[in-house]
Image: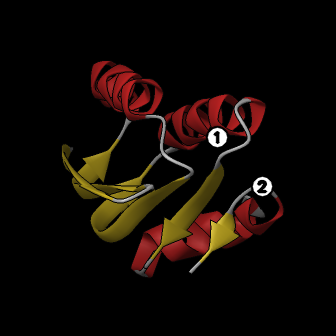
Amino acid sequence: MQHSFNLSGEVLQVLLEGRMTHADHRQFRDILGRVNETQPRRVVFDLGHVEFIDSSALGMLLIVRDACVQQNRAIVLKNPTGQVEKLTKIAKLHKYFEMQ
């Protein structure tokens, strides 16, 4: 997985690419660190270029979500497509994240 950040005002956009798997847990620590460092009011994960996601990566997204919720920050999953969209529906992530 590759990731980059775009901070605009009070919105931190996390742009993700490639395959999201358990092997990416260190990168998720970096993402969580950036969320805590910048303290945005809204965190948007752009999944438009993610081709695969496994259950471990879903768990990591939920860890970031829990941290955001504790700090009264909105969290969004944006542009899931293909396998990623199917998995977000099966996992009913719309109950935990704002979906765009």
Specify whether 98 is left or right of 28.
Answer: right
Neighbor class of circle 2 (other Cα within 10 Å; few <14, some 14-19, many 20+) is some
Quadrant where the N terminus sits is top left
Q: Residue at x 42, y 52 (%)?
A: 53
- At x 48%, y 35%, the residue is 39
Mark 2 = which residue? 96
Q: Residue at x 26, y 58 (%)?
A: 15
Q: Nearer the viewer, residue 28 or 33?
A: 33
Residue 99, position in %: x, y?
A: 63, 74
Amino acid type at mark 1: Arg
Q: Give the side of residue 45 with respect to residue 30, left or right.
A: right
Callout 2: SS: loop
**Callouts 2 and 1 close, C-beta under 8 Å:** yes
Q: Label 1: few (<14), some or many (≥20) within 10 Å?
A: many
Q: Quadrant of residue 26?
A: top left
Q: Which residue is mark 1?
A: 65
Residue, far right: 95
Checking the image for residue 8, the label placed there is: none
Residue 52's place in the image compared with 65, above or below, is below
Q: Amino acid at mark 2?
A: Tyr
Q: Position of residue 28 (x, y in %)?
A: 37, 29
Determine whether 53 is above or below 36 in the image: below
Task: State the SS at label 1.
Answer: helix
96 relative to 33 in the view: left or right? right
Residue 42 in picture, x, y percent from top left: 54, 55
Q: Residue 64: x, y in percent?
A: 56, 34
